[in-house]
Amino acid sequence: MSKLSALASVISLPVVLLLSVMLLLGGCSQNRTMLLEATPADRAANQPAVVKATAVPDLQPPPTQPPTDVPFAASASSANPFGLLLGSDDIDDAYRIALIKALGVTYFRPWYVNVEGWSGACYDLGCDLGPNAGLKLILTIRNNVSDIAPFATTPAKDGAAYRRNVSEILTRYHPEVLVVENEEDTAQYWAGTPEQYAAQLKAACQVAHDQKIPCANGGLSSKTTALLVWADYIEHQQFTEACNFVQRASAELAPDLCRFTAIDHLSDADKAAVITGRKLLDVYKSSGQDYLNIHWYIPDKAALSEAVNTLKRVTNLPVMSNELGQYDQAPEAAQKLLSAALDLKFPYAIWFSLDRNTVQALQNADGSLRPNGQAFREFMQAHFQTVAALPALPTPMPTPTSLPKFAPKPAPVAANGQLTFSQVLRDVTYCTNDGVDLLMDVYFPWKPAGPSPVILFVHGGGWVAGTKTGTPGMSYFLDLARRGYTTFSIDYRLAPTYTFPANIVDVKCAVRSIRAHAQDYNIDPKRIGAWGASAGGHLVALLGISDASAGWDVGQYTDQSSRVNVVVDMYGIHDLTTEYVVGNVRGLDRMVFAATSPADPILAKASPVTYITPDDPPFLILHGDMDPVVPYTQSQILHDRLIAGGVSSALIIVHNGGHGFNAIGGPISPTYAEIARTIIGFFDEHLR
């Protein structure tokens, strides 16, 4: 199982598009031959050889001798074989690693590393934090992830590039074990054939062995593993044993299998799983891998023992698991699986502590331990005496608070069904940077009494997409016109064609241009508010907090100031050195900010929190507590830093609000209408 999260929003970028860009996705036809293996002659000619698929025999006992092409003897390096894949949408990476250490394990499984999109660093900060804390990595690599549900990996198209990137990943992190792909038996995670997977697995293992690192397959799913054991009993006409196994494996297998006496009796889906599983078992025998990796969620010690014994007999490989877990929070289930893994002498046994679908984590969303988590910790202490004091719980999710009270003023023009903008100017060039004409639309108010206050709106889109007209924020522009505001909605240069600081240079140029043409627009250059959402929230926060010393006031109209009077920031990104995307997907680091690693100084330079001084304008910050894209903690961080820095700030946490304030789990509170009134009241109080 894996987690995939991506930066997208109602006001910003659609999920599929951003995933495509952020992860540099690519695909190939499933029946296309993968070019990974090469003979010495082929390599000398720089031409990879074609991998030929071989026939896959039925499940039979393996040869008595182990594979002979493994260049070294791989073995676990610790008496404690246990590790954790632990995550939560509401706890940060530092707490995650501290909790893993406190639970007393040896190993840490971070989120997968994208081979095709490798940019020099794992997007999971835990890849660095874990080893720094003394944890050893069980590292999963996936070639890429499709941008089409269900987000399965497609096989490598360029064998040389695949090998090169795998080698760089291993050199960078030198894990205890390399795991190649994830649940390669399921269409959810692998879009290729077993033969294509065989070529990719063998190539990755050869690269790993060059660096004296053992390797394993991605992990047969718990369901397929159980079906293979049942099928083995059936083919040996051990029907009683097969039924007994079904009863023990009831967490994965349907009771009907007790009535079946042939594989042909299975459903089409289960039959296909057995066929694919058997092909993969043959792949494992010839791949050169060091361990056979399974995923297991059946809380029965005898069932796991049967599975391990069957797979060892068939493949002659030692069995490990980089994913053990449970479908409930029963402490006895955790104890049974941990005890079984220890008795079966698993070299590596990694617990999957994440709430996903029906799987249950060891910890709650706030990081506190559940009953199964307490049982896990007690087991570690009883057997290895390795547990430590639990870390203090991270800051809990804020509860919704009453809306701040601002001083809205009566609208100069009463609303009616016929009222529209008095005038709209479209595609006005506000600046030209690097030869690019930067455009804005201008929405004028009705019957202004004099020079009007200004709202500058900056769209979202993950810094890589979005336009001045493609945002639901436009629904507010008419309300602003009725209240006497002139609204400027701008485009700015997008990544990856233009990396940071091009975007903030453009936004600052827009403010200077508006001031320079104040008389043309009949506006008051001393009353300018900035408003943005998602990536636009980041840019208006940076606009409001930074001054000329940041070096971004370049280009045209430099005789004008780019400072603004107030900022409305909706679900923006404020500290790029922390988890600024749920799941810590770091692909944007390189694409938008040209960062070479999560520690690159450019990420601090691009973070609004870096520049806070007491003379910054008042902020109104809004964020949904259920935002699945940008953690609400980003807004909490900014609000806390502003207050500490002597700056006026109001933070509104929208209960049940997702990214864009779409409702998740129930109606949002405050409502859309209340949010609109609050934003307009904030502008009125400071600009009218």
Image (spheres, rainbow, N blue to C red):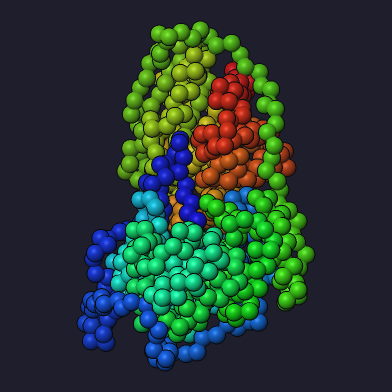
Answer whether residue 256 is visible to the viewer in this image.
yes
- Is 597 situated left or right of 38 in this image? right
Numbered-mark total: 0
Where residue 211 appears, x then y in whole percent? 46, 83
Above/below status of 10 relative to 122: above
**Quarter occupied by residue 24:** bottom left
Answer whether residue 224 is visible to the viewer in this image.
no
Q: Name which residue lies at 47% across and 90% down.
A: 72
**Quarter occupied by residue 96:** bottom right
- Is 69 situated left or right of 622 in this image? left
Where residue 337 appears, x then y in whole percent? 62, 69
Where residue 82 appears, x then y in whole percent? 62, 73
Above/below status of 601 relative to 279: above
Quadrant including the C terminus? top right
Is 610 or 656 nearer to us in this picture? 656
Q: Name which residue lies at 52% across and 69% down.
A: 245
- Is 396 situated left or right of 442 in this image? right
Is 47 or 412 nearer to us in this picture? 47
Is 252 or 463 nearer to us in this picture? 252
Q: Name which residue lies at 69% across and 22% down.
A: 405
Above/below status of 191 relative to 212: above
Q: Name which residue lies at 58% across and 63% down.
A: 325
Above/below status of 218 relative to 145: below
Where residue 363 appears, x then y in whole percent? 67, 56
